[in-house]
């Protein structure tokens, strides 16, 4: 650089000399002085530029040195991390704790390093740069020496001490040296506390009773699912079973009723009360009814005599029937002891023969055995099926009451077990919280002087690391030196205790109490959700079932009306033709009168009963329809195609009483029967009634339609309740299973993690408390061993 300046300067001088020779001679002296001055200035600039260049080179060199130092420090940090991992494998967690404290300070040092470098470069000149570097190095050395005093000789200047931290040696020798330490048992305890405990008996008991409570809930739901379907099916069956009179006796009664309609019109024709055309007109209405009555009877016999529950009532039941021996008069009867099924089979056969006699009339002589069998055994069949119907009615009410009681009683043991589980759950939950409190309350063993000393040590380390990073570079852990420092500190503490024996030592006295609100909320939540599930299932089922007794009473009463109304009018006709039946006795006559009186009583009872929709299992729509039929025309309810000239007979029979509604019709029929009872059925009458039995027959069919609709409505309502019940059950079961899975795989892990984190709280206590306080060690060891945390 200087050479270039000299050449440039000489070249300029020669150029001026040759171009301005005259001028140079005149001002030679001044010009030479000026040139010399410029040269000196240029030379000074060159020197300054050279010094600046040297300064920049030194600065770059220093930056490279710092970069190398930082890279070395990072490499050593990675080595320290590897050492920490190895320490964890060798069960030296307490040593790892110390390393982590220093590592955290090292990281803060790296963040301050570049800032210190930039400030250092801006503040110092080149002349003082080397001096400041030397001064900084001496400060770092002083800091390190002080740190050795505070940390416990952690910087090794002895090759023997270095062997304690070199992990490249055998693991066996390292562990052997560690076991010789006076603090080995404390190292082991702290290391075990720092390990993650997977099997915790206290938590297993806590969540075991939690699961037991929910399993009881699942058991309750499962039992309800299994019983509810059977119970709802039984409900429908009982409504069907009490109609046994409707299935077997009513077809027989209307069969007789149709026959007496025919006989009455034949008598009216013989007495010339009606013309032959009128007789033929009415016969067109009557004859199909006889055929249809038999078909209905046969259908019911084939369907319901196969019912297993009905067979339970009649399987071993025998009846004494009377059968005509010969066709000739007088009628001679023989008695046979046969099963009820056999007796009904013979009855069905006799009705078939009677039906064929109307379809294909054949002149007969004497008495027909099939007719004799029907009338002679009529009393037996009516009595038996009346008794069976009443027994089924009583049995159905009894069984449904048992169902309601079972649903309610079933809740009691399940609820007891669940409440017992919740109490144990609350107990172990409280023990769990108490254990956490014990870990937090270990702070009572911390002396204030130990805490102050630990804070000063941490602050000193932090301040020292802020001033220089070489502390990290030179750090080497020394177990022997550390324990020597702890031993010295323990000796000082013992001397201080002897000196201050009469004074009370200052210790941190505060306790941690975990709120019981989460415990209370947990128990209440489980109890509330159980009550919602159990209560809803029990309430829906028991409330609906509790309406059964009044509903089936109403159902049976109207079903019996459909049987007793046609039966009473056919029996009335038998009493007027009583003399035509030589095999009937006075007892039989009294039976018929009693049956008519029973029909009157049933009609009166039915008309007097009030309908309370809230206590019946029927839908509101059906009850509205029924109330409408009570006061309005009943004819639209029947199938007009089934009858000959339906419009005429339904609108005009018994003065058109069917158009006034069910209540008016039954009242009219009841009035007729009461009048007949009042005159005690004399042996003769002026003439048979005209178009009276037609109204009774049609009313019986109307009641049959009403009972069918009633039965379908009950089945529909039962199905709705059953579906609602199944929905509640399915939701409850799904919710409970999801809750169990959530608790097992989420809540349990969270509790276990909280406990493992809490038992590590001892690691943040002062080192003097951890290693020198025997009371702290005993209490900590007692806690972890009693709860099997290690």
Image (tube, rainbow, N blue to C red):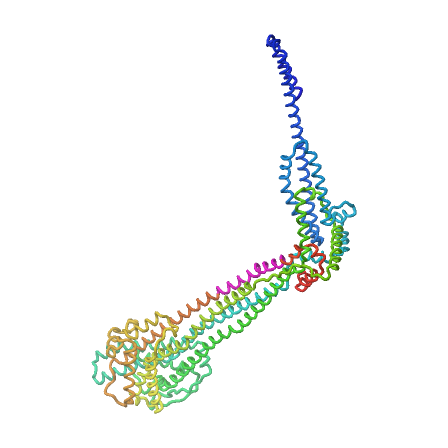
> In this rendering, is residue 655 above or below 131?
below
Question: Residue at horizontal 46%, vertical 83%?
Answer: 316
Percent from the top left, x then y, of residue 680? 29, 89
Say which of 333 and 649 sits in front: 649
* Secondary structure mostly seen in the magenta stretch: helix
Is 744 magenta? The answer is yes
Residue farthest toward the top in the current orientation of the protein:
22
Percent from the top left, x then y, of residue 286? 28, 78
Q: Is residue 353 visible?
A: no
Left or right for 143, reference 555: right
Question: Residue at horizontal 44%, vertical 68%?
Answer: 722
> In this rendering, is residue 179 above or below 368?
above
Quadrant housing the N terminus: top right
Q: Is residue 11 visible?
A: yes
Is 438 magenta? The answer is no
Quadrant housing the C terminus: bottom right
Report how many numbered discs are placed on residues in the image.
Answer: 0
Quarter assignment of residue 580:
bottom left
Percent from the top left, x then y, of residue 472? 69, 44
Percent from the top left, x then y, of residue 133? 69, 36
> In this rendering, is residue 294 above or below 62?
below
Question: What segment carries the magenta color?
Answer: 730-757
């Amino acid at each position: 650089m200087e050479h270039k300046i000299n050449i440039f300067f000489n070249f300029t001088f020669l150029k001026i000399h040759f171009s301005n020779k005259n001028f140079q001679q005149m001002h030679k002296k001044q010009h030479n002085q000026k040139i010399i001055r410029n040269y000196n200035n240029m030379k000074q600039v060159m020197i300054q530029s050279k010094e600046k260049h040297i300064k920049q080179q030194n600065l770059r060199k220093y930056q490279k040195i710092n970069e190398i130092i930082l890279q070395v420090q990072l490499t050593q940090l990675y080595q320290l991390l590897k050492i920490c991992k190895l320490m964890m494998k060798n069960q030296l967690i307490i040593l790892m704790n110390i390393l982590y404290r220093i590592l955290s300070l090292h990281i803060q040092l790296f963040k301050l390093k570049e800032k210190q470098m930039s400030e250092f470069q801006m503040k110092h000149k080149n002349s003082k740069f080397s001096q400041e570097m030397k001064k900084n190095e001496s400060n770092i050395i002083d800091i390190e020496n002080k740190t050795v005093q505070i940390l416990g000789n952690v910087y090794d200047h002895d090759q023997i001490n270095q062997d304690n931290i070199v992990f490249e040696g055998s693991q066996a020798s390292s562990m052997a040296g560690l076991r010789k330490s006076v603090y080995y048992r404390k190292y082991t305890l702290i290391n075990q506390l720092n390990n993650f405990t997977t099997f915790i008996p206290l938590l297993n008991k806590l969540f075991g009773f939690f699961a037991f409570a929910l399993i009881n809930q699942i058991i309750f739901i499962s039992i309800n699912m299994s019983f509810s379907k059977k119970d709802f099916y039984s409900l429908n069956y009982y409504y069907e079973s009490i109609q046994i009179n409707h299935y077997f006796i009513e077809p027989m009664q209307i069969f007789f009723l149709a026959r007496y309609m025919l006989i009455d019109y034949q008598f009216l024709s013989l007495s010339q009360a009606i013309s032959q055309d009128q007789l033929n007109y009415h016969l067109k209405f009557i004859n199909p009814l006889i055929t249809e009555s038999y078909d209905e009877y046969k259908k019911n016999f084939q369907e319901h005599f196969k019912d297993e529950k009905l067979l339970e009532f009649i399987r071993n039941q025998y009846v004494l029937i009377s059968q005509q021996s010969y066709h000739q008069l007088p009628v001679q009867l023989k008695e046979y002891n046969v099963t009820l099924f056999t007796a009904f089979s013979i009855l069905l056969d006799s009705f078939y023969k009677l039906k064929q006699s109307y379809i294909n009339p054949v002149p007969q002589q004497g008495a027909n055995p099939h007719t004799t069998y029907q009338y002679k055994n009529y009393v037996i069949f009516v009595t038996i099926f009346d008794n069976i119907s009443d027994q089924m009615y009583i049995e159905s009410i009894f069984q449904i009451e048992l169902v309601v009681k079972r649903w309610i009683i079933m809740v009691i043991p399940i609820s007891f077990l669940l409440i017992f589980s919740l109490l144990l759950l609350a107990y172990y939950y409280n023990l769990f919280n108490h254990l956490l409190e014990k870990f937090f309350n270990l702070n009572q063993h911390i002396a204030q002087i130990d805490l102050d000393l630990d804070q000063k040590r941490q602050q000193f380390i932090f301040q020292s690391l802020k001033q220089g990073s070489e502390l990290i570079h030179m750090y080497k852990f020394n177990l022997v030196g550390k324990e020597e420092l702890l031993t010295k500190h323990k000796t000082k503490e013992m001397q201080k205790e002897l000196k201050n024996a009469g004074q009370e030592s200052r210790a941190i006295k505060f306790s941690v109490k975990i709120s019981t609100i989460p415990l209370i909320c947990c128990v209440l939540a489980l109890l509330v959700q159980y009550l919602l599930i159990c209560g809803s299932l029990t309430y829906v089922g028991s409330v609906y079932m509790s309406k059964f007794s009044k509903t089936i009473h109403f159902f049976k009463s109207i079903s019996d009306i459909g049987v007793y109304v046609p039966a009473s009018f056919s029996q009335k006709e038998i009493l007027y033709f009583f003399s035509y039946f030589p095999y009937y006795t006075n007892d039989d006559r009294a039976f018929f009168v009693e049956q008519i009186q029973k029909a009157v009583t049933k009609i009166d009872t039915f008309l007097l009963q009030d309908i309370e929709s809230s206590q019946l299992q029927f839908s509101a729509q059906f009850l509205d329809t029924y109330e409408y039929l009570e006061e309005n025309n009943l004819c639209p309810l029947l199938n007009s195609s089934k009858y000959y000239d339906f419009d005429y007979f339904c609108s005009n029979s018994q003065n058109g009483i069917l158009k006034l509604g069910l209540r008016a019709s039954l009242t009219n029929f009841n009035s007729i029967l009461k009048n007949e009872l009042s005159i005690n059925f004399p042996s003769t009458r002026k003439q048979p009634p005209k178009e009276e039995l037609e109204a009774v027959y049609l009313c019986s069919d109307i009641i049959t339609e009403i009972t069918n609709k009633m039965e379908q409505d009950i089945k529909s309502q039962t199905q709705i309740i059953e579906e609602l019940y199944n929905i509640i059950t399915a939701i409850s079961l799904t919710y409970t299973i999801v809750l169990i899975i959530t608790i097992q795989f989420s809540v349990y892990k969270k509790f276990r993690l909280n406990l493992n984190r809490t038992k590590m709280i001892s690691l943040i206590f002062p080192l003097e408390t951890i290693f020198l306080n025997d009371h702290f060690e005993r209490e900590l060891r007692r806690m972890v061993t009693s709860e099997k945390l290690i």
